Amino acid sequence: MKKVTAVIRPEKLEELKDALNEMGIHGMTVYEVQGCGTQRGWKEYVRGNEVMLNMVPKVKVELVVGDVQVEPLIKRICVVARTGEVGDGKIFVYPVDECVRIRTGERGEAAV
């Protein structure tokens, strides 16, 4: 099992949810986050002073999937979330040692 974390533009979330549903992937955790990278943010004026706001709003989507689903999932996220502009986001993949469904006690991929 792998945990796939995608940090994407907020306006791409609904399209991504629809695409994942088409793939049969229904379980996910979504966070509203802020971050910075090469996008670098923008300047605003606060009380007459110029302030650099480098924390850009993003959405972080976390999914745990079986190993065979990882590559198709990455490809789908890239297709859906890509605009071609700086700030499209990143995908991170982590190993998952165990998953337990609290309600039933199921373990492993059956619990996902």
Image: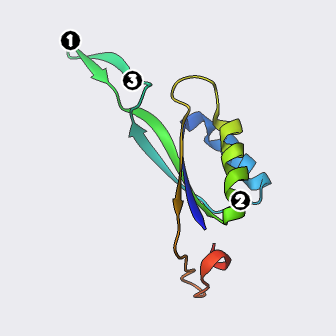
Look at the image and name its color scheme. rainbow
Indicate the amino acid at tag 2: Gln
Task: Specify which label sits upstream in the sequence, 2 or 1.
Answer: 1
Name which residue lies at 48% across and 50% down: 31
Secondary structure state at the residue bearing disc 1: loop
With 95 as the anchor, is 74 left or right in this view? right
Secondary structure state at the residue bearing disc 2: helix
Quadrant housing residue 41: top left
Indicate the amino acid at tag 3: Gly
Name which residue lies at 39% across and 24% down: 40
Query: Mark 2 = which residue?
Result: 69
Task: Specify which label sits upstream in the sequence, 3 or 1.
Answer: 3
If the image is split into quadrants, where does the C terminus sit? Answer: bottom right
With 34 as the anchor, is 90 left or right in this view? right
How many discs mark residues in the rendered view? 3
Secondary structure state at the residue bearing disc 3: loop
If the image is split into quadrants, where does the N terminus sit? Answer: bottom right
Indicate the amino acid at tag 1: Gly
Alpha carbon of mark 2 to alpha carbon of mark 3: how far? 34 Å
Q: Residue furthest right?
A: 22
Quadrant housing residue 36: top left
Query: Mark 1 = which residue?
Result: 48
| Position above or below: 87 against 105 | above
Which label lies toward us, 3 or 1?
3
Which label lies toward us, 2 or 1?
2
Image location (x, y in percent) of residue 71: 69, 52
Image location (x, y in percent) of residue 89: 53, 36
Labelled pair 2, 3 in contact (Cβ < 8 Å): no
Query: Mark 3 = which residue?
Result: 41
Along the viewing direction, whichever of 105 and 98 lies nearer the viewer:
98
Alpha carbon of mark 3 to alpha carbon of mark 1: how far? 19 Å
